[in-house]
Image: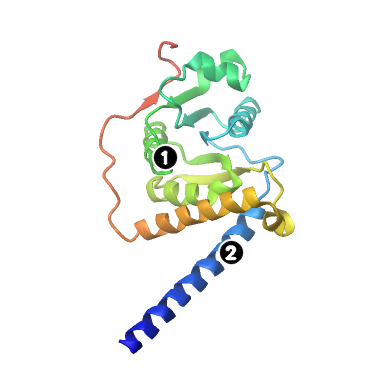
Amino acid sequence: MARALRISAFSILVLAALFAGGFGWFASTVSHMTTPANPAKADAIIVLTGGQSRLDAAMDLLASGKGERLLISGVHPSASRRQLQAATGGDKALFSCCVDIDRAALDTIGNAEESAKWVESHAYGTVILVTNNYHMPRSLLEMNRLLHGARLEPYPVVNTNLGDGGWLTKPEALRVLLTEYSKYVLALARGIVPSRQTGGSVAVAQAATAHN
């Protein structure tokens, strides 16, 4: 019994050390991400909802010709095209012609599934991915599992400077990083089991459809 307890305690310590070490790497990686000043032009742009700054950045990229079309993934079903356009302050004509909306995705896995369908339907080869810096590692992990043949160019949005260990002195930033790292670890673990089926209709509302 004593031997079993020692083995259990040792295993817990090893797992805790691995988790802590992994978190240190994750926090360092995220805190050193910067928003590209002049990203290379891609075929398209995908932004994952979750903050106004993400949408603003994606619309700026579209307006500056960094991609032919923009997919806004994870939009709440009650949000209309008009409301989205007003919220971003984007050009109405540009929004009408070149923005597609995904209302089906409920999480990052859903974002990846719907984005993969959209990318495949347009045969895009390069895509700029816009999301917050702390969300970028997990987003890339999920996206790369499904976007076969397409190259993702990360465009991290940085709202809080976390460089030089700044996250250690910011309780809210530390909480966000720990939460996101835990989700990242779970996403890695999920990769060792078969992925869920992605059947069903493509839930991307094309810009050419009637406005809500």
- Please report the residue visible at 44 percent of the width from the left and 26 percent of the height from the top: 76
Q: Quadrant of residue 191?
A: bottom left
Residue furthest out toward the bottom: 3
Residue 180 is situated, as x and y percent measured from the top left of the image, at: 51, 51
Q: Nearer the N terminus, badge 2 or badge 1?
A: 2
Residue 66 is situated, as x and y percent measured from the top left of the image, at: 61, 33
Q: Is residue 115 above or below residue 149?
A: above
Q: Left or right? Give the position of 128 relative to 125.
A: right
The residue carrying pointer 2 sits among few (fewer than 14), some (14 to 19) or many (20 or more) residues within 10 Å by Cα, namely few
Of residues 194 and 162, the one nearer the viewer is: 162
The residue under label 2 is which amino acid type? Answer: Trp
The residue under label 1 is which amino acid type? Answer: Asp
Instruction: Kindly identify which residue carries mark 1.
Output: 107
Q: Is residue 94 visible?
A: no
Of residues 64 and 31, the one nearer the viewer is: 31
**Dividing the image into 4 quarters, which one contains the C terminus?**
top left
Of residues 18 and 158, the one nearer the viewer is: 18
Q: Left or right? Give the position of 17 relative to 188.
A: right
Q: Is residue 165 above or below residue 134?
A: below
Q: Secondary structure at mark 2?
A: helix
